[in-house]
Image (cartoon, grey):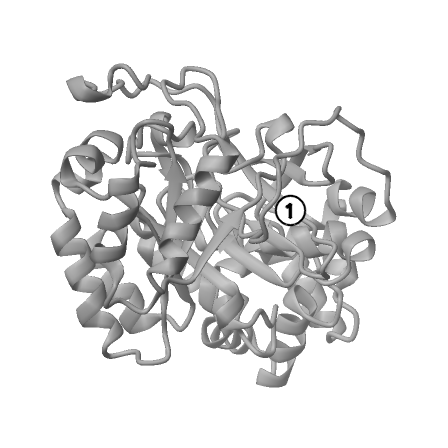
């Protein structure tokens, strides 16, 4: 579920495709590693899979000082280096660089392609070791904020009916390194062009909290003050509503939480988001009320994809107000982005504005997200490839809307 937090109102861009400009960082980022970076399979470690204490312990186990571990950490994540190859580890002990070239890997992903949408959004296709492909989206903003939308799985098991990725089925979880590497590549490839990459959203392919161990660890690496240095308030992890994992995330992470709500009744949510059959609205929202009392400065971002004739009525707006009125939150209304095999239609812009205004009048904080990258299948709900999970039975009263 690729969801990109660009929060002022505007029409979706549907202009012609344009080619990405060549850049020095692009070619250096996808060049082949030197021959010294290869050794016998099974004897190498992936450095980006480690948090700092683990990296420090590993460096010391190889006979080097802890201070060298911090220098290595900053080469991987800070100092505008974002190293992918041993020859980029400037300042490190020569023997340590040699040991790393023989026994460690610095790069967890390989760029397969970069596609540029008409609005400047970039979709990066990455190849994994097993030849699986994931997609990452980089969204520049004229206001000086650039967001990277990262994936957490190949495919997704949730089968959300409006989401292209959600109907792929789950192929595999991404490792910590594969998640972190998406943010590293975003900075390495596009910092020269866009300036600082300031925000991370876990809203690409996959259900992040279905891969909760690696997502929590990856997000902690992203916000490390000696590393990538993202503000915890600018790293947002989204979920379709896995209640036990929500509790764990709110206890263990200081990053922000987004919940993909998308319906105001269990009847509709059971249909469009099957996870609701296990964790219904009452349980989900009750958990958020209880847990957020323990984090008094935190709020939850409720994402709400507007589906014409399904969840966009006046009654839906009233119910939504009642459902979330005592939960510290913001509401993010998202125009549905069509894709092949989709049953749904987007709510017209004027009706989205009416829906927004009703929520605002009730005292809620509401934003409407721009569609970005939709002409290159890079927008919310468009990542991935055609899937095999079944379409679910449509409640009779919604057949006309489809």
Image coords of residue 305 (percent x, y): 39, 39
- The one nearer the camera, 48 or 105, is 48
Image coords of residue 101 (percent x, y): 67, 57
Query: Up-down: is 381 above or below 399?
Result: below
In percent of the image, x 30 and y 35: which residue is there?
Answer: 311
Which residue is label 1 attached to?
138
- The one nearer the camera, 76 or 104, is 76
- The one nearer the camera, 91 or 168, is 168
Q: Is residue 379 left or right of residue 158?
A: right
Q: Quadrant of the C terminus?
A: top left
Q: Secondary structure at mark 1?
A: strand
Q: Quadrant of the N terminus?
A: top left
In percent of the image, x 62 and y 72: which residue is there?
Answer: 73
Query: Up-down: is 15 above or below 206?
Result: above
Q: Is residue 95 left or right of residue 3?
A: right
Q: Is residue 49 visible?
A: yes
Residues packed near mark 1 inside 10 Å, few (<14), some (14 to 19) or many (20 plus): many
In percent of the image, x 38 and y 59: which residue is there?
Answer: 361
Query: Up-down: is 6 above or below 293?
Result: above
Q: Is residue 169 left or right of residue 12?
A: left
Q: Is residue 5 left or right of residue 18?
A: left
Image coords of residue 370 (percent x, y): 57, 43
Image coords of residue 356 (percent x, y): 43, 49
Residue 390, quarter of the rendered image: top left
Q: Is residue 174 visible?
A: no
Query: Up-down: is 227 above or below 149?
Result: below
Residue 312, quarter of the rendered image: top left
In percent of the image, x 62 and y 50: which residue is there?
Answer: 107
How many numbered marks appear?
A: 1
């Amino acid at each position: 579920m690729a969801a990109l937090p660009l929060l002022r109102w505007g029409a979706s861009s549907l202009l012609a495709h344009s080619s990405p400009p060549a850049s020095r960082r692009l070619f250096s980022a996808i060049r082949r590693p030197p021959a010294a970076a290869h050794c016998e399979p099974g004897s190498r470690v992936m450095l980006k899979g480690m948090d700092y204490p683990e990296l420090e312990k590993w460096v010391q186990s190889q006979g080097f000082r802890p201070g060298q571990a911090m220098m290595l950490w900053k080469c991987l994540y800070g100092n505008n280096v974002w190293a992918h190859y041993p020859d980029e580890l400037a300042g490190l002990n020569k023997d340590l660089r040699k040991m790393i070239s023989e026994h460690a890997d610095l790069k967890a992903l390989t760029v397969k392609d970069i596609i540029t949408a008409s609005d400047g959004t970039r979709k990066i296709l990455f190849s994994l070791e097993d030849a699986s492909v994931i997609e990452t989206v980089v969204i520049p903003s004229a206001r000086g904020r650039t967001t990277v939308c990262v994936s957490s799985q190949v495919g997704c098991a949730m089968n959300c009916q409006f989401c292209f990725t959600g109907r792929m089925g789950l192929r595999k979880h991404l490792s910590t390194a594969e998640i972190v590497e998406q943010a590293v590549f975003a900075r390495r490839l596009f910092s020269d062009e866009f300036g600082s990459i300031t925000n991370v959203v876990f809203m690409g392919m996959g259900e992040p909290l279905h891969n909760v161990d690696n997502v929590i660890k990856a997000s902690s690496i992203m916000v490390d003050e000696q590393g990538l240095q993202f503000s915890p308030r600018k790293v947002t992890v989204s979920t379709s509503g896995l209640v036990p994992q929500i509790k764990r995330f709110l206890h263990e992470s200081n990053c922000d939480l987004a919940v993909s709500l998308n319906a105001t009744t269990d009847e509709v949510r059971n249909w469009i988001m099957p996870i609701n059959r296990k964790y219904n609205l009452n349980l989900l929202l009750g958990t958020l009320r209880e847990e957020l009392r323990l984090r008094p400065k935190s709020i939850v971002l409720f994402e709400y994809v507007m589906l014409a004739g399904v969840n966009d009525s006046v009654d839906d707006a009233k119910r939504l107000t009642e459902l979330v009125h005592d939960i510290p939150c913001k509401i993010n209304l998202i125009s549905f982005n069509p894709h092949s095999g989709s049953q749904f239609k987007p709510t017209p812009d004027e009706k989205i504005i009416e829906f927004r205004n009703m929520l605002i009048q009730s005292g809620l904080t509401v934003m409407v997200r721009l569609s970005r990258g939709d002409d290159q299948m890079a927008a919310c709900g468009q990542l991935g490839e055609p899937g095999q999970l079944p379409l679910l039975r449509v409640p009779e009263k919604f057949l006309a809307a489809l």
